[in-house]
Image: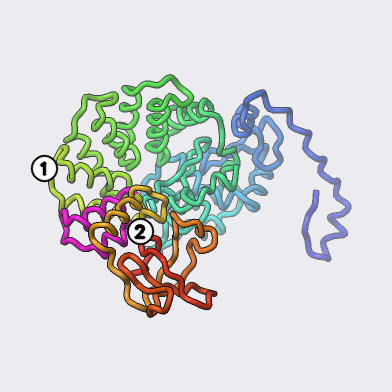
Amino acid sequence: MLVKVDGDLVESLMSLPVEPPPPPPPSPEEHETLIQYNLRNKVCAYCKRPGARLKCEGCRQRRYCDRRCQKRDWEQEHHRQCVKLQQVFVPPPPGWRGAAAEAGGGGGGGGKAAAAAVDVDDDDEIENPCPICLDNEDDATVDGQHAGMCTACGQLYCGVCNRDGFADRSPNCPTCRAPFRVSNEEGFKRCWKLEHDRSPGRHTPTAQNSLGVAYYKGDGVEQDHVEAAKWFRKSAEAGDADAQFNLGIMYRNGEGVEKDHVEAVKWYRKAAEAGFANAQFNLGLMYREGEGVEQDHVEAVKWYRKAAEAGHATAQNNLGAMYGTGEGVEEDFAKALKWFQLAAVQGFKDALKGLDLMEQHNGIPTPPPSTAVTTILLTSANAAKYNNKAGRVVTPTEGAAIKPGRAAVLLDGEAAPISFKLKNLRVHP
């Protein structure tokens, strides 16, 4: 065993017998995950020997052979994880921060380190930080993107990390190290265990929604819309925005429940007010069509705008159409162009059709010189050369005259302006 010590202690320690290495663990059973193997064999979190008898008194999730293994694991790693595991698996009682510090100190001799980690009085402290970026609450919906969750341990990670594809870049959970990507059957079993075998906690609504999705799609279990609606409702009533949106869809389509547009609007609104972009778009659609609510184009624009600002391409397209026709908002071709272009950047084909119609019937307004633009050229053969290249609108020159629906642009790194159709430019506000 390697020990880092001061020079004057090395000689006396070198005479001590060396601890033998732990025996190799038995092979996991077929189709068994690492976390299932560790639980079945009661594997020590520090030395990896099976048959561990002690548990951490704080999180109750890590086993140890004896107090020595527990102390060493606390010093090396567990002092950073214990509080997070408690937040996932143990419903936090009043004064949980102090209790976590005491549990950490008693669990491994690291009381000062544990207290420093959790005893924080800063009002801006993130209570449940995302274990990946540490910048947001782990269950935060960010810019319309909902949080993700490890179905093995229930650890949540924020919408930014979920949107950036953390589970694709890092195949294992940062908390329990279990693989993220498993079969539909294994994913269903994991969520079922989170719901039925663990104490209720912050992971519970997400696990319930995941069960609803599995029953709705027939992923890992026989398809059953009635059962899906049941789990969506449990999660929705606990405040999960994804489940609220999903339950709204079930009521709008009459899947697993009796069709009820009023009830659909109710659940869409809850998810929309929580910042869920898909729900904001659907709520705007209900107002525009007068489904479940009195038709109100002004209210439709309001909810389309919220979703569009979060990057929802269909909402951007629909908002552009409403500015182009003056529905619920004052007619404004420049703003219609802006939202159509933003949708076109994401490859939304109907936005290109909207731009074509504007060019044919309305005349797309030409931006003044010095306007900053980015070329997108979604329909151009030169897309590979000019796509997403910044530039600025310049004074017309010979061979690059500005005409309705066209602009002369000097691209970065180019010596002469090039004439582009305005519908293939994204004009910066």
Q: Identify the main secondary structure in magenta.
A: helix
Taking 133 as reference, is 331 left or right?
left
- Secondary structure beneath dot 1 equals loop
Q: Which residues are drawn in magenta? A: 314-340
Is residue 23 visible to us here? yes
Q: Quadrant location of residue 209?
A: top left
Q: Earlier in the sequence, mark 2 or mark 1?
A: 1
Q: CA distance from mark 2 to mark 1?
A: 30 Å
Residue sitting at x 19%, y 50%: 300
Q: Which residue in the structure is indicated by mark 2? A: 341
Instruction: Identify whether 91 is placed above or below 121.
Output: above
Comparing marks 2 and 1, which lies closer to the viewer?
2
Image coordinates of residue 35 in percent, x first then y, are 60, 34
Residue sitting at x 38%, y 80%: 395
Q: Residue furthest left?
A: 294
As rendered, which of 218 and 159 lies closer to the eye? Answer: 218
Image coordinates of residue 405 in percent, x first then y, are 32, 65
Residue sitting at x 51%, y 40%: 150
Quick check: is 316 in the magenta stretch? yes
Taking 271 as reference, is 147 left or right?
right
Q: Name the amino acid type tagged 1.
A: Glu
- Secondary structure beneath dot 2 equals helix
Q: Which mark is residue 294?
A: 1
